Image (tube, helix red, strand yellow):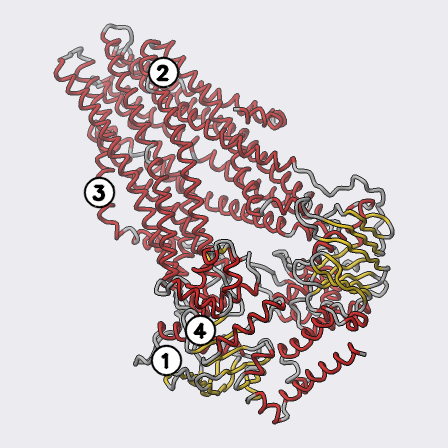
Amino acid sequence: MRVFIDLWWFFKREKRSYLLGILMLILVSILSLAPPYVVGVVVDAIVEETLTLEILMGWLGLLFLIGIACYMLRYVWRIMIFGASIRLARLLRNWLYEHFTNMSASFYQRYKTGDLMAHATNDIRAVQQTAGAGVLTLVDSLTMGGFVIVTMAVTISWELTLISLIPMPFMALLTSYYGSLLHKRFRKAQAAFSSLNDKVQESVSGIRVTKTFGQEQEDIESFKEESDDVVKKNLRVARVDALFDPTISLIIGISYFLAIFFGAGYVINGTITLGELTSFTIYLGLLIWPLLAFGWLFNIVERGRASYGRISELLAEKADITDEEATQSEPPQGEIDVWINSYHYNSDDPPALRNIDFTVKRGETLGVAGRTGSGKTTLMKLLMREEEGVTGHVKMDSKPLQEYTLDALRASISYVPQDQFLFSATIADNIAFPKPEASMADIMKVAKMAHVHHDIIGFKEGYDTVVGERGVTLSGGQKQRIAIARALLLDPEILIFDDSLSAVDAQTEESILETLRTERDGKTTIITAHRLSAIKHADLILILADGDIAEQGDHQSLMKRRGWYSQMYKQQQLESYVEKGGGMDGTRG
Amino acid sequence: MEHEDRQLTPKEQTAILKRLLGYALPHKKLLSVAFLFLMLGTAAELIGPLLIQTFIDDFLTPRNFPVDALTALATAYIVLHVSSVFFNYFQGYWFHKIALEIVRRMRIQVFSHVEHLGLSFFDRTATGGIISRLTNDTERVKELYVNVLSLLVQDLVFLVGIFIAMFYLNPQLAFFCLFLLPLVYALMYVYRKFSAKYYGTMSGKLSELNARLNESIQGMSIIQIFRQERRMRKEFSELNQEHHSAWMKGMKLDGLLLRPAVDFLSILALMLVLAFFGLLSFTSPVEIGVLYAFVNYLDRFFEPVNQIMSRLSIFQQAIVSAGRVFKLLDHEEPAPSKSLAGNPTIERGQVEFDGVTFSYDGETNVLTDISFSVSPGETLALVGHTGSGKSSIINLLMRFYEPDKGEIRIDGEPLGKFDDEELRTRLGLVLQDPFMFSGDVKSNIRMYNDKITDEEVYQAAQFVDANRFIKNLPGGYDHPVGERGGTFSSGERQLIAFARTMVMQPDILVLDEATANVDTETEEVIQRALEQMKEGRTTVAIAHRLSTIKNANRILVLHQGKIVEDGTHDNLLANGGLYYNMYLLQQGMNQQMISSSSS
């Protein structure tokens, strides 16, 4: 029940809805007591032959009015209570989203997307149910249950009430027990289903290999095994699920039996009338729901509490990169000074970078190369302050990055990421992402600069083509060039290419770089690459190896050194010629 | 294959439902038993109030209490009740079980169907869609069976049972009670009509909302670096608001037409019963027990009604899902297979293309009049731009696609004569993207084939020199391979893919060389492995490596789907054609670089 205290702030905030809703629930409970009473009165009148048409019509009219009133009250409390719970879901969802947008990269390394999604869907649903169905079951089981029992005891017979109620607590206990058992088994069934999902995912993605080896039948067999497991786990759910109705029916049956058996005795000795006995059994029927609700309440609250705990924990996460020390709100201009004694992601890990020392003047181009894992991306992250905490310093315009507000810093940096992430939106929207108000002319201009304009107008819907699962599938090169156009739209002071030319062919790469050189005159550009042709024109080239600078200089001086750079450069030149077949039809243009 | 948001016509819905019900046929036996239990359970449950009625009218009202008769009545009540519990437990469980079995069969059927579709289907269709058909949509069908259809059967039997009991007690009143049916039906009809719309919008908005959230989480660094947090928040909260409004609408509809409305109906029913007996009592004596039983029955009547109505929205969605599944199931696009008589085997490994022309879409030819032949044991290198047709040649040779014109022969026999089994085991294809399956290293080399012994797996790995790195893994050959083999480097994945192919000891090797850069040490291992693999085998290779090209017995230079040059390395050099030019260029580059770096 502690979750109700945890959610107290929300109940307070929605005071009106909850108070009104609960009031109506109570009214409905009271009104529900009337029909059984009416039945009892009419039965007695029939037995005693005192019933007249007027009396009958009077009672029927009353029933009708009660029916109408209940209908309206039931409608309104739903709007009040369930409506408020839906607003809670909306609120939490907005909060989570806002919180996500404030979190730094380390947060996203700690939490998997799938888990975050689960919090934002399942957990919110569980909390919403607590604020809706949870409140309903709590109020209903207490008021309705209480009223019915009191009415039975006071107006008919407290002895008979006690006797008939003996089996009822078992129903609440058992259904609550089944509920939690069901929930556990259900989760296992869900896990089996998600493993089936993984299997399907793998089979469909790996279909070419499967077909190459003619292993379709074997793959189907292994799918069958997974399906069998899903059925097995679900059957375990079914076994519990099937218990609910028979158990309820059994316990109610016993209750009725006790009521009739002992009630008959009271009728015979004249303690109660036949009509009262009839009312009594109907009241018993009215008790089923509050008792079920009571059992149900525990499950809802249990789940709601766990879920709300997880959501609160998530919301309590602090961003580790903040504006705390910021004094500068003017964006820097692109003079970079880096001296990293060492940098660790975690204090236990070996350093990801060490002894990095270089400066880039405004308007210069920095090229960074090295094998996968040599620290290129880490260096870029530090420059963008996506990560921080070096011993040493990372400065722009001679001021440490922490002195700039994130907003100011980001205003001068534009970035083309390695993984070519695009949103499921039109190509135009994707390019205009950093500046939604950009004109079509601007968008086309940068698309041309990124050499993707021709690809785009080749699509049936041109710039309005939707990207992603529901739209066209773009090649890696096209995605990369759209991401480049997106970054260029801001005409940033500092432009960072993180291995962003890997999927475009050498000729296009050369043209894009050429465009950059002319268009970005006087502005700083940073390029990391596997393919050295992308950085050979840079003013300064750093070769990283295991987090260290292994070689540095410009193209000429590095070629002279005959080290890793010159070796790789030659090898790549050769390979690209062969790969393209470019040399072969070179004569045609 | 894409999502269709259009509404299905009632006729289509009926057809889909009929087809779905067809899946229950193989379970006739258990279904009959479950149905029998359902009837028995329902009967036992519904006889209870009749016994109480007998007690009230025959014994309690006349104050007549013969011990034997009463004991018998009480015993009967208890026995009936316990047996109804027993019957109902099993029928409930069995219906659930049948539903699960049906969905399993359907899933396997769809999966097998998909697995046997031609590669052309997979090349054209987004993977996400196929996966969604196989998982989410079949899961919806499961919901339909478990939560809707089986409950519907149970509830309908219960409702019929109630009416039978009521007719038995008092046909006249029971007849009046029939008026409830059109009311209930009208309620359902109206509810279904609106709920389909409201809940459709709501679930559409919800999936939009979740998609947006998912995408934002994945692209958060982009959102932040471009400072679009505020805009994204605003857009999200607008979408959240739209979802909220749709949800509220649905909830209001539920409030108007579901439980509150049904509860109102039950008050009407109670009024009817009281009016009937009240009016009757003016003219003739009334059996209170019958009144009691009626009130009791009508009370039970409305629970199933509530249940059916609350499940109606699931029904709608599941039918749409089932429609999509059936559409995929009806999609015929079989993989090309043996089409000619005969049963040749591949002995020598001679490959021949004879005037082959091919297009994927029937409009633009990606290959035009390709003819060449590779003698047993020789290596053919295919060289050319992306899109020049290299991959298509391999697709045709592997019989993933069929040529529009011309013939492909192996050992002089047309490709159409070979069994799938023969082609798949004698032709070893090494793909550019070495896809890894979850399992362990061994299972990734053996690929489900139980005939391959562990010893053979080790030999194959040794043969391609993958042995060394595998041995160093924790657990060696039993080292687990996670999703997509993410823990292996691309070079290691390639070596495993090599071993996977070599373990079958194919006669013809088909190579699609990877362009991706592998670090130099692994690259050397890979080159050596490739040399080993080609030894004594006919090899057709899409070549990116200079070594592969130089050592080839023959090189085909492709451009826009045509062979523009054809010959051996020396040959092509001597001819002074394009290849020669290219080679000179490379040499020149070499010279230039050496001189520039030494100067």
Q: Secondary structure at mark 2?
A: helix
- The residue that disc 3 covers is B33
Specify whether B336 is left or right of A339: left
- The residue that disc 4 covers is B428
Q: A584 above or below A353?
A: below
Nearest to the observer: residue A140 or residue B427: B427
Q: Secondary structure at mark 4?
A: strand
Q: CA distance from mark 3 to mark 2?
A: 43 Å
Q: Nearer the viewer, mark 3 or mark 2?
A: 3
Q: Amino acid at mark 3?
A: Val
**Labels 1 and 3 in the same subunit:** yes
- Give coordinates of residue B595: x percent, y percent: 77, 81
Please report the residue visible at 58 percent of the width from the left and 24 percent of the height from the top.
Answer: A5
Q: Amino acid at mark 4?
A: Gly
Q: Nearer the viewer, mark 3 or mark 4?
A: 4
In primary-sequence order, the first of circles 3 and 4 is 3
- The residue that disc 1 covers is B346
Q: A539 above or below A94?
A: below
Please report the residue visible at 39 percent of the width from the left and 72 percent of the height from the top.
Answer: B424
Nearest to the observer: residue A472 or residue B417: B417
Say few, some or many: other residues with alpha carbon within 10 Å of mark 4 (under 14 / 14 to 19 / 20 or more). many
Q: Amino acid at mark 2?
A: Tyr
**Labels 4 and 2 in the same subunit:** no
- Callouts 1 and 4 close, C-beta under 8 Å: no
- Callouts 2 and 1 close, C-beta under 8 Å: no
Q: CA distance from mark 1 to mark 4?
A: 12 Å
